Image (cartoon, helix red, strand yellow):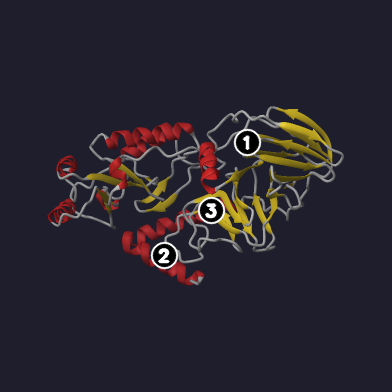
Amino acid sequence: MMTDETYRTAIKAFFEQIGGKDFVEQIQASDEQIQRYRKQITKQPAPQWITPDKVLQMEHTPQGAQFTCENAKVLVTFFADDCIRVRVVHPSETFNPVFSYAVVKESPNPVDLEIITENDAYILRSAALVCRVQIAPYRLEVHKCDGTPVVIEADGPALDMHGRVKLSTQLEDDEASYGTGERVDRLNLRGRKLRFWNTDPAIYERGSDPIYYNVPFYLGLNQYGAYGIFWDNSHDGTIDIGQTDDSLLTWESVGGELRYFIFSGDIKGILERYTELTGRHELLPIWGLGYHQSRYSYYPQEDVLQVAEWLREREIPCDALYLDIHYMDGYRVFTWDKRGFPEPAALLQKLHEMGFKVVVILDPGIKVDPQYEAYISGVEADVFCKFADGTPVLGAVWPGACHWPDFTNPKTRAWWAEQCKAFLSSGVDGIWNDM
């Protein structure tokens, strides 16, 4: 495992190589700014977890039920016969309309739901699942209609007074654990504790965590079949897949509503239901399924044409060529390097005539440069990330000091789309989103 000192030395040498000492100084200044703001964040005390405890009242809701407990309110909704959403809030709070960065499906599918009251539990039954809510204390169990277990809460959901949320469910002894996004690890993640926090590490190795792309979706396979859990929370968090306690799957986030979905079925059905919930990729063009040639990096444009001609001369099937960051003017996105790529339109036309599509890389770091059109436009549109006091976040990547588009803002997404639209009009066929 790489030590912190070895990592820092390697990173410094890497950035000095690509940008010189000035670039390294910009990175250090950016890091110092971020550290200053971090010191202003009050460190939270250790969590004092509160569980719902006894159910005091049950109310019927559309396709589900709301449970008022001594220490929480719980809303259970069937989104489909084989999919259940659970929301948990403090007892003084109400269930506001849901906001989610991930879920695009606004309304549940119609479900014929039967609700039964027993002495010690409430039973919610669909055509595929039975959800049993124990009364004292509150505890949720989901089974298939034949009694096969799907998800069984361990200690119940938990909240604390500082906004943190937590959920533990039981792991079967033979359970294999998959999902959670991009990990530098084995495929079966049983026994790991992983973080949900996207980062852009310059260097990583096996076991490094987190890295670029984290998705709070878990797929479990055990003797009873398959099930899925989607933790619908974008805050910094973790998933403990039996590392602390080998019998428990534990989710935890520093904030946000405690909200999750349970999926049951075979793997294909679970993934279909999950993507119905979160959205599906547009169907790729047929050339997107072919062989694509890429490396770091083709420069200048004569090298691109040479590779294209080499592939065609040898009759190697290839549908697309990729251009990495060196096609840009000083690594500024939405620009072309005038020396290496003096005639981009002619280059693209030539490649198209040879039967190639062209995909270019785009980075979200917008160089701080008052002469740079994308920077000027971004400042005018007020689309960059800011600290709480309104100061723009400054980071340092390939171009040097950069601001970052705030993609949580719909206005920013529209602004970014306009930049891409103008760039694509030059003849570029596809975009490679980096970082």
Give the labeled residue for mark 3.
179
Residue flagged by tag 1: what amino acid is it? Asp
Q: Is 42 left, or right, of 136 in this rendering?
A: left
Q: Between disc 1 and disc 2, whose residue precedes?
A: 2
Residue flagged by tag 3: what amino acid is it? Gly
| Residue 166 shows in this picture | no
**Viewer-nearest residue: 182 or 135:** 135
Relative to 251, does residue 353 appear above or below in the rendering? above
Q: Quadrant of residue 115?
A: top right
Residue 315, position in %: x, y? 16, 54
Residue 155, position in %: x, y? 76, 52
Q: Secondary structure at mark 3?
A: strand
Q: Secondary structure at mark 2?
A: helix
Residue 230, position in %: x, y? 59, 45
Give the labeled residue for mark 2.
11
Relative to 22, does residue 420 appear above or below in the rendering? above
Q: Secondary structure at mark 1?
A: loop
Task: Using the image, tell me which numbered label, if any, was put on residue 81.
Answer: 1
Which residue is found at the position 60% from the left and 31% from the top?
A: 108
